[in-house]
Image: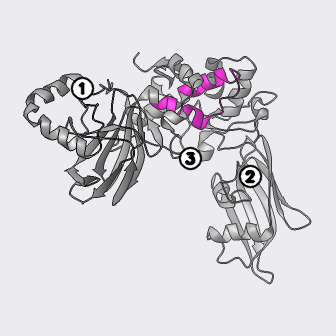
Amino acid sequence: MNHVPVITHKNFFKFLFIYSKKLSFLLILIFLIGCSSGKKFTRYNDLKFDESNNIRVLLDNASSDLVITVNDAINILVNDRIIARVNSGNKLRLVNTSSSLNLVIGSKEFNSDSFIITPADQSEIIKINNKKYRGRVNIFLGDSEIKITNQIGLEDYVKGVMTKEMPIGKANENYNALKAFSICIRTYAYNKLSENKDFFDIYTDTRDQVYGGVDGESELTNKIVDETKNQILFYENSPAKMFYHSTCGGQTEDVQNVFGKKNIPYLISIKDGEDPYCKISPRFEWTEKFTEATFINRLSRAKLIENANYYVSDIVVKSRFESGRVNELDIIVNDGKEVQKTIFLSGNSIRSIIRSSDDKSILKSTLFNIGINADRDIVIIGKGNGHGVGLCQWGAIGQSRNGIDYKKILTHYFPGTVIKNIYD
């Protein structure tokens, strides 16, 4: 693995001393690629990274070329040395040569195993590709492709996820829900750090948690993250496995029933209050309706039948989990003549095969009833949104609006867990 270096005030001034004879050359180079005449790179901003809690977020990757648009002045470093300052409006073209990485800026070309992008002019924010990031951006070759990561402190990462994953509400109505959720985000990310991956720790999308950089922050959520700084959820002596979803529909789900994991005592099916806290969710109840042809096409696309020349004879829920979610679903189809087939679907795969009627997303949940109406449309009437495991976000919001504090919200959804400081 190529470790990307961090520049500090101390080693930067060492650089000035050792390379003072080359300084004039560097200034000429900087001028050629668009430096403002009144600015110099000698006032480099020390990022003050705490290496114990940095997280590397994969922003982009490609096998051959990538282009980065610069939206505000940046510094580019190689081996702790600033090789160029690039002003807003320039583009960085990255080319994978297999053996190394070429960086092309206008008529200038640089070659290295890795490059670092940092803010210029004492700014705390990097602005590239019309997005804003704290920390620094690393560019390198890994697994034979170009990778771009945002290396950032754990707390700033949590801030960049908050508004992208949960409604913040009006004023302080969701305050304790958001406070509980900040601990969930941090716990999830901390577990990802412990995996010790070679090139990056976490994705920016639903493969992990949706991360928006500075654009994912707000004044309210930043304040909340500061209040829970370094706090994660523990069960006994280990960080808790973290799962959350939008709306449980009145009952959460046991992790074994969705993800096939062994029994986890704090990820069990629980009732979301006598009167469900998540009933305020816009997805607490929903209906999907499919034409018979559309429904058959979904089965054909999933290669469960060899073609779409079938009709639906019946749909039977064979079994449900204790939560009420569908475990086994039998779909009986026929070819209009003699051939009849039974298609068996189970667990969470039901959602990815049937999908929503507009085909824009997977089915909202498996907590549903299904049938065929008089017009031969397939109608699904359901509750909830998401897999149902762990924290119910709208349930947490409902509790928050009922005056329940964040600690009780967390113990409600993760019974037996406690909040601890990472460094205790």
Checking the image for residue 301, the label placed there is none
Residue 8 x, y percent position in the rendering: 24, 26
The amino acid type, in three-letter code, at marker 1 is: Thr
Crowding around mark 2 (Cα neighbors within 10 Å: few <14, some 14 to 19, many 20+) is some
Q: In terms of image quadrants, where is residue 276? A: top right
Q: What residue lies at 51% left-to-right and 39% top-to-bottom? A: 211
Residue 77 in picture, x, y percent from top left: 24, 39
Element at label 1: loop
Q: Closer to the camera: disc 1 or disc 3?
A: 1
- 3D distance between C-alphas at marks 2 and 3: 17 Å
Which residue, given by chain and number where applicable, does mark 1 sit on? 8
User: Of the numbered discs in the image, which one, if any, rests on residue 319?
Assistant: 2
Of residues 104 and 368, the one drawn nearer to the viewer in this rendering: 104
| Left/right of residue 91 with respect to residue 182 in the rendered view | left
Q: Mark 3: few, some, or many residues within 10 Å (few <14, many ≥20)?
A: few
Q: Earlier in the sequence, mark 1 or mark 3?
A: 1
* Circle 1/circle 3 CB separation < 8 Å: no
Residue 102 colored in magenta in the image = no
Q: Nearer the viewer, residue 397 or 147?
A: 147
Mark linked to residue 260: 3
Which numbered disc, 1 or 2, marks the residue closer to the eye?
1
